[in-house]
Amino acid sequence: MIKGLAITPPTLGRISIGRVVEKNGKRLPEKDDQFTITSQIQNKEGWVKHPLDEQLRANASNQKLRSIPVRMIFNDPDLNLRAEYTLFDRQTGRPICVGDGQTCQRLTNQGVEQHPCPSPDLCPLAQGGHCKPYGRLHVNLDESDEFGTFIFRTTGFNSIRTLAARLSYYHAASNGLLSCLPLQLTLRGKSTTQSYRQPVYYVDLTLREGIDLQSAIHTAREIDQQSKQAGFNQKALDQMARQGFANAKFEMDLEEGLDVVEEFYQTEEQQQSVVQNESFNIQQGLKGSVTALN
């Protein structure tokens, strides 16, 4: 095994709730109110949609994909969802510092060093919004490829917190049979003061529609027994994945880092433009309210 190379689940495609669009000659991240499933291939218009996107969208109301049936590959919640505070180099996409709120691995001129991780709010290196929580959820969509995954990447606290809670709860409730449960990704929305009362969308993990928890656990036990009789060793699979993740200091490669920077990180100029647009929309809304009252 090559040391320093993280062995991560094979990726067949991506799941996103946003996209990168070109405006005035600049590529900017744009949020969406639905899921999009893409392949790993890009063209001039962006990421090419995966055939599963059209298949699932055909059964969705209003053609908006807001739920996706999924299966977890691992029983251990921490193997399905990987999340840390991450500071990327905005130019190269290379991870500079990765931490869990207690300790971090930091790239310096002397190599990779371990330091305390006080979280982005208290870390001098993270000031200016340069360090964000970065989560990667690996899920299986295509049962014909048992170990192939589609990856959902996010820097949103709402998605990471909700997914982490759901995974740990379902793991506990099913007596560790997380990989056997019939689950689905669900898109939810909420409004906050920071979002200027506009809806913010995040990803939740629930049981598939029409299935209650007791039925899901019963089905999971049956699947687990059948798999064991066939000789399948889920415990060994989880352990192998755990070793693969630990084979490198940083899980992300340069290519992934560049995609993350483009999708989730805005320059100061872009942030100022967003603030100006939001302020303009609020002002227009207030003017409309005053006109309606008059």
Image (cartoon, grey):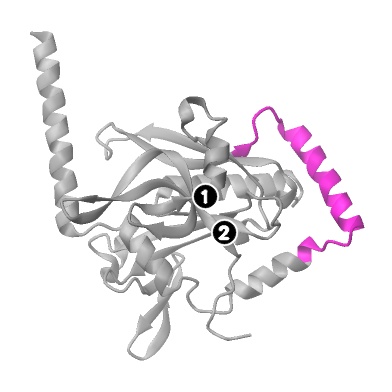
- The location of residue 268, given as percent across then percent down, is 17, 58
The answer to the question of whether label 1 and label 2 lie on touching residues, with beta carbons closer than 8 A, is yes
Q: Tag 2's secondary structure?
A: strand
- The location of residue 265, given as percent across then percent down, is 29, 58
Q: Classify residue 282 as left or right of residue 12.
A: left
Between disc 1 and disc 2, the foreground one is 1
Q: Which residue is mark 2?
A: 12
The quadrant of the image that shows the N terminus is bottom right
Q: Classify residue 270 as left or right of residue 248.
A: left
Q: Classify residue 128 as left or right of residue 66.
A: left
User: Which quarter of the figure has residue 253?
Assistant: bottom left
Q: Which residues are magenta?
A: 206-235
Q: Magenta includes 227?
A: yes
What label sits on residue 50 in the rendered view? 1
Q: Residue extending furthest bottom?
A: 110
Q: Classify residue 77 as left or right of residue 44.
A: right
Q: Residue extending furthest right?
A: 229
